[in-house]
Image (cartoon, grey):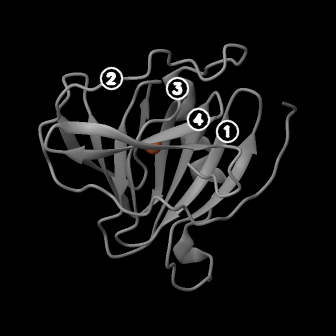
């Protein structure tokens, strides 16, 4: 894969999120976290720095774009290389992405405007929530499973960096017996978005 730049805006089919807190039972994580053995995986500090750099210098919050109301999440691919990718995501109020992994990629997110609520499945298989405000971010390794929702009244804008670039994402549901895989989306899908 050569160094390329392109832009993409699309609606993602995974529009519903999980917002309840629950204790999660163990589940089978991917046997191999490696998305691509040939790709370089940036460490979490580097991913956080990239997310903050792009978020503080290359992204205009939705509220300043003059594009009117936002009905569904909107995506733009800012950068794609062999080793990482950078997306900006605009989240309408109540816009959410259900529990998902990142196909073995590591990642980081940085909130440019508004705030996002994240629910993450911990190593101890608990489901923990936190709010990430503007100017804040987080990073994660290849086995991370979380959901994200904009619980605020205004559009939130965030930057997401993944390394290596994601090849797939598996989505999970939260049931009485814990979280279980629901489906896997692949990058080759024209509707692909993180
Ligand atoms: Fe994610």
Q: Earlier in the sequence, mark 4 or mark 1?
A: 1
Q: Is residue 125 above or below residue 63?
A: above
Q: Nearer the viewer, residue 156 or 40?
A: 40
Q: Is residue 156 above or below residue 107?
A: below
Identify the image quadrant of residue 2.
top right
Would residue 83 appear left or right of 100 to someone viewing this image?
right
Question: Residue visible at 44% across and 32% down?
Answer: 139
Q: Are marks 3 and 4 in contact (CB under 8 Å)?
A: no
> Quadrant for ligand 1?
top left
Q: Earlier in the sequence, mark 3 or mark 1?
A: 1
Q: Which residue is mark 1?
A: 85
Which dot marks residue 119? none
Q: Earlier in the sequence, mark 2 or mark 1?
A: 2
Which dot marks residue 162? 4
Residue at mark 2 to residue at mark 1: CA–CA distance: 27 Å
Q: Which secondary structure lies at badge 1?
A: strand
Q: Which secondary structure lies at badge 2?
A: loop
Q: Which secondary structure lies at badge 4?
A: strand
Q: Are marks 4 and 1 in contact (CB under 8 Å)?
A: yes
Q: Which residue is mark 3?
A: 104
Q: Which residue is mark 2?
A: 28
| Circle 3 or circle 1, nearest the eye | 3
């Amino acid at each position: 894969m050569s160094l390329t730049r392109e832009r993409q805006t699309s609606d993602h089919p995974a529009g519903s999120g999980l917002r309840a807190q629950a204790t999660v039972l163990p589940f089978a994580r991917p046997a191999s976290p490696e998305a691509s053995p040939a790709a370089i995986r940036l460490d979490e500090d580097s991913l956080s720095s990239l997310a903050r750099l792009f978020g503080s210098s290359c992204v205009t919050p939705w509220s300043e774009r003059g594009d009117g109301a936002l009905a569904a999440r909107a995506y733009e691919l800012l950068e794609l290389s062999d080793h990482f990718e950078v997306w900006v995501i605009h989240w309408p109020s109540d816009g959410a992405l259900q529990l998902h992994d990142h196909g073995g990629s590591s990642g980081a997110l940085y909130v440019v405007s508004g705030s996002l609520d994240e629910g993450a499945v911990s190593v101890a298989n608990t489901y923990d929530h936190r709010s990430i405000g503007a100017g804040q971010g987080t990073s994660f390794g290849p086995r991370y499973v979380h959901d994200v929702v904009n619980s605020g009244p205004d559009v939130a804008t965030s930057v997401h960096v993944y390394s290596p670039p994601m090849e797939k994402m598996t989505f999970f549901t939260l049931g009485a017996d814990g979280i279980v895989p629901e489906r896997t989306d692949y990058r080759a899908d024209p509707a692909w978005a993180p």
